[in-house]
Image (tube, helix red, strand yellow):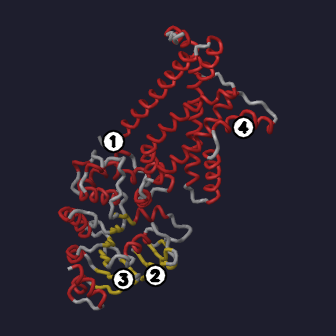
Amino acid sequence: MGFDFKYSVMWESVPTLLVGMKLTILITIFGLVIGFVLGALTGLLKIARNPLSRKLAGVYIESIRGTPIMVQVMFIYFGLPMALGMRIHPMAAGVVAIAVNSGAYIAEIVRGAFQSIETGQTEAGRSIGLTHFQTMYYIIWPQALKRMIPPLGNQFIISLKDTSLLVVVGVGELTRTGQEIIAANFRAFEVWLTVALMYLVMTLSLSRLLNYFERKMDINK
Amino acid sequence: MIKIKNLHKSFGTLEVLKGIDLDISQGEVTVIMGPSGSGKSTLLRCINRLEEITSGTVIVDGQDIMDKNTNINMIRTEAGMVFQQFNLFPHKTTLENVTLGPLKVRKMSRPDAEKLGRQLLEKVGLADKADTYPDHLSGGQKQRVAIARSLALRPKAMLFDEPTSALDPELVGEVLEVMKQLGREGMTMVVVTHEMGFAREVADRVIFMDDGVIVEENTPKEIFSNPQNPRTQGFLKSIL
């Protein structure tokens, strides 16, 4: 009773899996866009002069980094609605989970990139009469952004893969779709292999895209 | 032009400036010398408030820099600063480094700013480097761009914080040449440096600082040939 590998199962599952993949991509994009804004703001709060804003940012970052994303997802989908007395759409819960989770890590990336810019740059900006905001906008931010790209790319890939955890709240993304196909045809090997390859296609494309931006921003070539 | 009265500056419990009085008039070139840790850079940085002063008054171009009604950004455009480490903006071309201030602070139009930028790059001998990024320049060239960047705001005074200390010896001359020319054109300059040749040739006055106070001040000729204070004598002996 040898294992009978069937290519045809892989091909046949692709159209259905593509539907799930589309959802995975959508959640990733919305989650990361919100996560980036949240992370950039939190990162800046973390280095602000006001001690209260530093504290607040710290509490957010530490509580997200210190708890499993699975627990965060379940808390947002099952926990929060009980406290708020309203239902939350699984997709919305997914986007919020990815945003809140990636935001904490992105905040640290943003903070690190800003702090890595030499103080001389700020002093030079201020010494030609730029305001604090102008110095940040014209001098520090563009340099920091360039240094953020490699770690951001890393985080984007992690968040993309984290969307597979949304299977626990029933979002029909790629992993969930795979599970459903297997429930009907019992071909776990072929289907999970196809699912894995599809994740790989997404993460590799994302890496390529980020490499392209990195090269584009490298002015000294 | 610059009036400093009883200036004190402490970093935590460490008092770096212990009561400085200094008057710098328009067009005067003042060189500040002294051993490392004597407070000379801090003094310079207090003039455009890159360091907050602890007590005393600093008046630049008639305005008290600590006064609430003083716009510190405008003071900074009147007292340009040149740093030891150049601090050029690496993501901007040479010309963009020079035009940023005129564009964003002086609200000049782009054609006017670029015209001014090119004029200043020519003045410091770098007209052909307008579109080059700082990483492709030598230290001496970077420092000349930094001088042009400060001059672009048409400041009334220029502050130089050890402008040649980070340079290879063969590149010092080209930067000093630009500074000498500025001095001859009547720019008010305060220069922290150990370049005795520069002080002799251009300075109206040399100030010797040690341990947070002005120990001695005189014309370069007097202070170098006939230093009065033993600390000045010791220091001059050590750098010759």
Task: Read off the residue under disc 3.
Answer: B210
Q: CA distance from mark 4 to mark 2?
A: 62 Å
Q: CA distance from mark 3 to mark 2?
A: 18 Å
Q: Quadrant of residue B42?
A: bottom left
Picture layout, residue A119 above or below residue B65:
above
The residue type indicated by label 2 comes to Lys
Q: Residue B65: percent from the left, percent from the top?
A: 49, 70
Q: Residue A211: percent from the left, percent from the top?
A: 40, 34
Between disc 1 and disc 4, the foreground one is 4
User: Do the numbered discs 1 and 4 sit on residues whose CB atoms are within 8 Å?
Assistant: no
Mark 4: few/some/many CA within 10 Å (<14, 14-19, 20+): some
The C terminus of chain B, quarter of image: bottom left
Q: Quadrant of residue B149?
A: bottom left
Q: Residue at x 51, y 46 (%)?
A: A109
> What secondary structure is found at the residue carrying circle 1?
loop
- Total marks placed: 4
Q: CA distance from mark 2 to mark 1?
A: 46 Å
Chain to which the residue tagged by mark 3 belongs: B
Query: Do marks 3 and 2 share a chain?
Result: yes
Between disc 2 and disc 1, the foreground one is 1
Chain to which the residue tagged by mark 4 belongs: A
> What secondary structure is found at the residue carrying circle 4?
helix
Q: Disc number at residue B5?
A: 2
Q: Which residue is most to the left?
A: B170
Q: Residue B104: percent from the left, percent from the top?
A: 43, 51
Closer to the camera in the image, A32 or A200: A200
Task: Read off the residue under disc 1.
Answer: A219
Query: Do marks 4 and 3 share a chain?
Result: no
Q: Residue A37: percent from the left, percent from the top?
A: 57, 41
The residue type indicated by label 4 comes to Phe
The residue type indicated by label 3 comes to Asp
